[in-house]
Amino acid sequence: MERTFESKEPVLFMKPDTALLKGDRPFFLPDFSEEIHYETELVVKINRLGKNIVERFACRYYDEITVGIDFTARDLQRKQKELGLPWEIAKGFDNSAAIGKFISKSEVPDIRNVDFRLDINNQTVQRGNTKEMIYPVDKIISYISRFFTLKIGDLIFTGTPAGIGPVAIDDHLQGYLEDRKLLDFHVR
């Protein structure tokens, strides 16, 4: 997974429910940014209430997975970072969290070894495998649950591999887990 700085713990940020983009609806480029980037990630859906979850039990707290796109207003993020300010406006804006169709995690042999990718206009632009993640899914869940009570239906984006980049009007994005297409939408 791509790391832009050294951190001994996962970096967390939150997106409001208005950030969700479901059902393969189009993503409309916002007028407040000139540099919207995609970040493809494995997404897990929490299926039970949890607080201070021990890592070895974290696998019990999700049973569905998908692929998602964490859209980032990169120009706003840079500006906020330079000023030492939080980056919520760069990450949590409306429709900035595109999510695919969920499948049972039992449909993949091992959550610690799942391929995922993003194709834009029929070209693979980003590819990753969960075995390459800086922090495994269960560690991320355990860490988050120290600070936030996880609730049924919460979604956790788990980090992006190298290869992030910009999107443009008329781009066609398709996200895959293994060879299964779970996300398919256009940029408008």
Image (tube, helix red, strand yellow):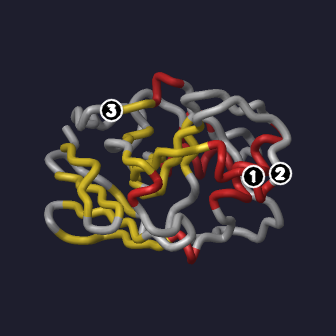
CA separation in Å, label 3 and label 2: 31 Å
First in sequence, mark 3 or 1: give its number. Answer: 3
When the figure is inspected, residue 98 is found, relative to residue 176, above or below; the finding is above
Give the numbered dot on residue 125. Answer: none
Badge 1 amino acid: Phe
CA separation in Å, label 1 and label 2: 5 Å
Residue placed under numbered mark 3 in the picture: 22
Residue projecting furthest to the top: 18
State which mark lies toward you, 3 or 1: 1
First in sequence, mark 3 or 2: give its number. Answer: 3
Q: Do the residues labelled 1 and 2 touch (CB within 8 Å)?
A: yes
Judge the density around disc 2: few (<14), some (14-19), many (≥20) Cα neighbours within 10 Å: some
Residue 66 in sight: yes
Residue at 77 percent across and 71 percent down: it is: 6
Q: Are marks 3 and 2 in contact (CB under 8 Å)?
A: no
Residue placed under numbered mark 1 in the picture: 57
Residue 10: x %, y % from top left: 74, 57
Nearer to me, 16 or 135: 135
Residue at 28 percent across and 37 percent down: it is: 27
CA separation in Å, label 3 and label 1: 29 Å
What element does badge 1 sit on? helix
When the figure is inspected, residue 130 is found, relative to residue 100, above or below; the finding is below
Residue 58: x %, y % from top left: 71, 51
Q: Do the residues labelled 3 and 1 touch (CB within 8 Å)?
A: no
Badge 2 amino acid: Val
Residue 183: x %, y % from top left: 27, 48
Residue placed under numbered mark 2 in the picture: 54
Residue at 78 percent across and 56 percent down: it is: 55
Residue 82 in sight: no
What element does badge 2 sit on? loop
